[in-house]
Amino acid sequence: MTKKSINIILIIVVLSLWGTAGYRYLSNFFTSDTLKAVNSHKTDIKFKDVKRDTFLLQPLAIDPFLHDAYAIPKPPVMHIKTTTINFKTRNTEKTLKSVISWPDIHYYGFIQSQNKNQVVLVKIDDKLFKMHKGEIINGIYIKEMFKDSISLVFNKERKVFKHI
């Protein structure tokens, strides 16, 4: 076979493939809908009743892979001894400190202007504040300010917060 005859055969094969694909695509637009409607309604289909298979799984006594018998552990038995303790009470009163819950505080920085005015950037409970020394916001008092940390007082309790 020569190159010319092979090219002719390949062109014929490609044209026939494209022609078949085009015919199938275009035949959907030009066929009648009555044939589709007749074929789509089949009412004589019957389904068999499916019965469920029920079974009960039992725990294995022997390991199927290692062929060892399982040792079923028994829950430990605990014996609790009860004893009574008598405490001697004193007449002195002890004062208990109440638990103080500090708000969420983050120290972001220190700014000092030319006239020695110092401002601190503090985030208290997701709100950003510019605070001066001695200023009170939300019950929080700035006692001391440094470049890397600040000392705050809240309900007579003092904490130091470092720069983030």
Image (tube, rainbow, N blue to C red):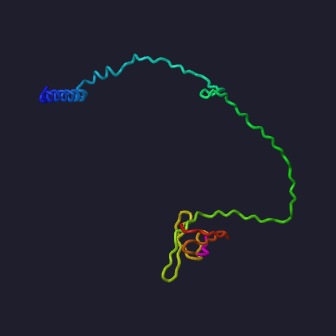
Q: On the rendered image, what quadrant is the N terminus found in?
A: top left
Task: Please tell me in which quadrant of the rendered image residue 90 appears.
Answer: bottom right
User: With 126 as the anchor, is 154 left or right in this view?
Assistant: right
Residue 13 image position (x, y, % from top left): 19, 27
Position of residue 59 relative to residue 75, above or below, is above
Q: Is residue 99 magenta?
A: no
User: With 147 as the anchor, is 1 left or right in this view?
Assistant: left
Residue 118 image position (x, y, % from top left): 53, 78
- Extreme bottom residue here? 115
Residue drawn where x is 62% and y is 25% of the image: 57
- Foreground of the two, 61 or 106: 61
Q: Is residue 142 magenta?
A: yes
Residue drawn where x is 80% and y is 65% of the image: 94
Which contiguous range is marked in magenta? Answer: 140-144
Task: Please tell me in which quadrant of the rendered image residue 61 appears.
Answer: top right
Position of residue 103 relative to residue 47, above or below, is below
User: With 8 as the anchor, is 103 left or right in this view?
Assistant: right
- Foreground of the two, 36 or 1: 1
Q: Main secondary structure of the magenta part?
A: strand
Task: Please tell me in which quadrant of the rendered image residue 60 appears.
Answer: top right
Residue drawn where x is 19% and y is 29% of the image: 14
